[in-house]
Image: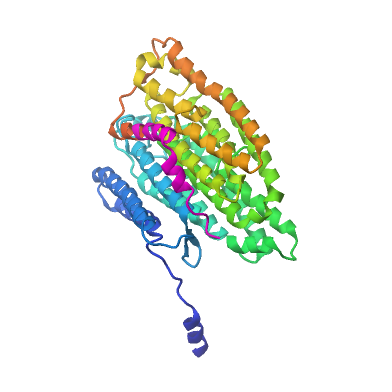
């Protein structure tokens, strides 16, 4: 008994910096409260209460983040929760990015005017194609379970980019992934396609998680720890076989590249982007990309920077494959959502270039984080526009249905044109600045051949963006073609916010670039 008491007295509770992790606690705490409200509130009150709670949570999290970022804090960052979470300058930037992109995504999710009753099905268990399934598509009540699921996914993403050890990173990966698997299968229209997308995403996601976890096990066997700093120390000099190190690294990176939709680990992307409800597609395309590349940057910079000469060539080849797949297969697509999906695969290749450009001044990291912010806002606005073009079956996403769209709705066509030009990297848009800073960092790191390949891929990818623009402006609309729905306030705000940020970052990117370049990952 005395021995047990003595052992208990030796166990010290971990120090917790509540100010540093306040944004994360606010999001996850609100997600738990949202679940309780979903169970206790009458159905007719849920939408308003859940929406207000979610938006207030995001605003409050941003406020607490700003308060902490502007207070006196260690310049190199702090490790809290027994060292499991590292709150450093890159983590704060990525948290802010996730919160503002999450705000825009929630506005699209909450809209009930574009699709009466919202984009989400009432009873997902009903078999697609049945009379009951067609009947529930006409209901106007919105399912509000999507709000707590979105908050949990967002909380998992925030934990993922700040994880200081691989075990915490794996738990965060599952917390962000499981809600997304559910959300992908809840489309009100095209139920079979939506459920197929959810199943594919779940099966491939579980497979990728197994790769990740097996890589963690091998790295633990090599370093004797799952902490990123301990792995870096062991990689710097140890008598253990490097086979465990690089085998573990390879399996770990496969899981990360899958979540980032980097080719050739992208097979889930076009099907899930097409089948998921469009607001969820926007959420995944923007926020999941930020979380995945935030994790990749932290792992490569903190744990494996000393061994970059061994793995850089492999990721060099992966970046080339991703850009080629995205650019070439994007040319063959006839569906707008699938086209943007392959566009995201090409952009993932560009982002990977910045991730492997580990130059001493950290410009590769800051350039990649700027690119993530710019791409996220453009993508949310683009999918917001896609949700407006509709026919009797729901969204009209086939390219032939977009013919002559400029004659039906000049404002929508002009907005989508601007967003496509930003994705193509045309000057005066955030897309141009993002590519410029990433390619500049790569040249500084001695990756000139990779930059040349990226420029060729960008030119090829620009063709399928321009094809849509030509189709909208220089083709005649079909008499029975789709209509452009007048967006509600939430969708209008989301699209406007995305377009304005895309323009502002293209004209005045200095502030965001300076913020992204302050500080480095805590090691």
Q: Percent x, y for residue 26?
A: 35, 56
Left or right: where 58 falls relative to 184: left
Number of numbered discs present?
0
**123 within the magenta span:** no
Left or right: where 52 falls relative to 149: left
Q: Which residues are magenta?
A: 496-523
The C terminus: image quadrant: bottom right
Q: Is residue 154 above or below residue 130?
A: below
Q: Is residue 157 above or below residue 233?
A: above
- Res 383 quadrant in image: top left
Magenta segment main secondary structure? helix
Near-viewer residue (7 or 327): 327
Left or right: where 135 falls relative to 374: left
- Please say which color scheme the image uses: rainbow
Near-viewer residue (468 or 153): 468
Q: Looking at the image, which residue is at 51% across and 29% down?
A: 425
Q: Percent x, y for residue 59?
A: 32, 48
- Res 135 quadrant in image: top left
Q: Looking at the image, which residue is at 36% across and 18% down?
A: 410
Q: Percent x, y for residue 367?
A: 52, 42
Q: Is residue 218 above or below residue 365?
A: below
Question: Does the rendering let one see residue 196?
Answer: no
Q: Residue furthest bottom?
A: 2
Left or right: where 405 falls relative to 318: left
Near-viewer residue (354 or 337): 354
Q: Looking at the image, which residue is at 40% across and 60% down?
A: 20
Q: Is residue 136 above or below residue 250?
A: above
**514 within the magenta span:** yes
Question: Does the rendering let one see residue 205?
Answer: yes
Q: Percent x, y for residue 289?
A: 50, 42
């Amino acid at each position: 008994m005395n021995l047990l008491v003595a052992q208990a007295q030796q166990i010290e509770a971990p120090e917790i910096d509540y100010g540093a992790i306040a944004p994360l606690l606010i999001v996850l705490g609100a997600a738990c409260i949202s679940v309780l409200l979903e169970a206790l509130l009458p159905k007719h009150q849920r939408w308003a209460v859940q929406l207000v709670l979610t938006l207030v949570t995001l605003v409050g999290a941003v406020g607490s983040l700003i308060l902490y970022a502007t207070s006196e804090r260690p310049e190199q960052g702090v490790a809290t929760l027994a060292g499991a979470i590292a709150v450093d300058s890159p983590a704060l930037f990525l948290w802010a990015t996730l919160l503002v992109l999450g705000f825009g995504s929630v506005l699209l999710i909450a809209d009930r005017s574009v699709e009466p009753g919202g984009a989400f099905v009432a009873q997902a268990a009903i078999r697609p194609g049945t009379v009951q399934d067609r009947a529930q598509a006409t209901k106007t009540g919105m399912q509000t379970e999507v709000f707590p699921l979105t908050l949990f996914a967002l909380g998992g993403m925030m934990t993922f980019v700040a994880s200081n050890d691989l075990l915490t990173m794996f738990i965060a990966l599952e917390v962000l992934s499981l809600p997304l698997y559910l959300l992908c299968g809840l489309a009100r229209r095209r139920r079979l396609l939506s459920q197929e997308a959810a199943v594919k995403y779940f099966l491939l996601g579980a497979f990728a998680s197994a790769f990740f976890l097996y890589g963690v096990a091998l790295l633990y066997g090599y370093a004797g720890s799952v902490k990123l700093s301990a792995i870096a120390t062991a990689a710097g000099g140890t008598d253990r076989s490097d086979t465990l190190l690089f085998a573990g690294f390879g399996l770990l990176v496969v899981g990360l590249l899958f979540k980032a939709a980097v080719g050739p680990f992208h097979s889930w992307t076009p099907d899930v982007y097409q089948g998921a409800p469009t607001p969820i597609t926007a959420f995944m395309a923007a926020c999941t990309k930020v979380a995945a590349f935030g994790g990749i940057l932290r792992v490569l910079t903190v744990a494996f920077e000393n061994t970059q000469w061994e793995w850089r060539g492999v990721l060099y080849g992966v970046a080339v494959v991703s850009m080629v797949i995205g650019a070439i297969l994007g040319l063959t697509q006839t569906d707008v959502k699938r086209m943007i999906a392959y566009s995201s695969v090409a952009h993932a290749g560009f982002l990977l270039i910045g991730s492997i450009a580990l130059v001493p001044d950290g410009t590769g990291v800051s350039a990649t984080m700027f690119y993530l912010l710019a791409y996220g806002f453009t993508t949310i606005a683009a999918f917001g526009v896609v949700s407006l073009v509709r026919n009797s079956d729901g969204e009209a996403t086939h390219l032939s249905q977009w013919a002559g769209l400029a004659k039906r709705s000049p404002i929508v066509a002009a907005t989508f044109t601007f967003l496509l030009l930003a994705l193509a990297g045309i000057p005066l848009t955030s897309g141009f600045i993002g590519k410029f800073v990433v390619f500049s960092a790569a040249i500084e790191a001695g990756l000139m051949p990779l930059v040349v390949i990226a420029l060729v891929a960008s030119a090829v990818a620009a063709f399928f963006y321009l094809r849509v623009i030509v189709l909208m402006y220089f083709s005649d609309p079909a008499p029975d073609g789709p209509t452009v729905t007048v967006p509600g306030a939430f969708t209008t705000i989301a699209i406007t916010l995305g377009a304005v940020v895309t323009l502002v970052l293209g004209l005045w990117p200095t502030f965001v670039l300076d913020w992204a370049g302050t500080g480095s990952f805590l090691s």
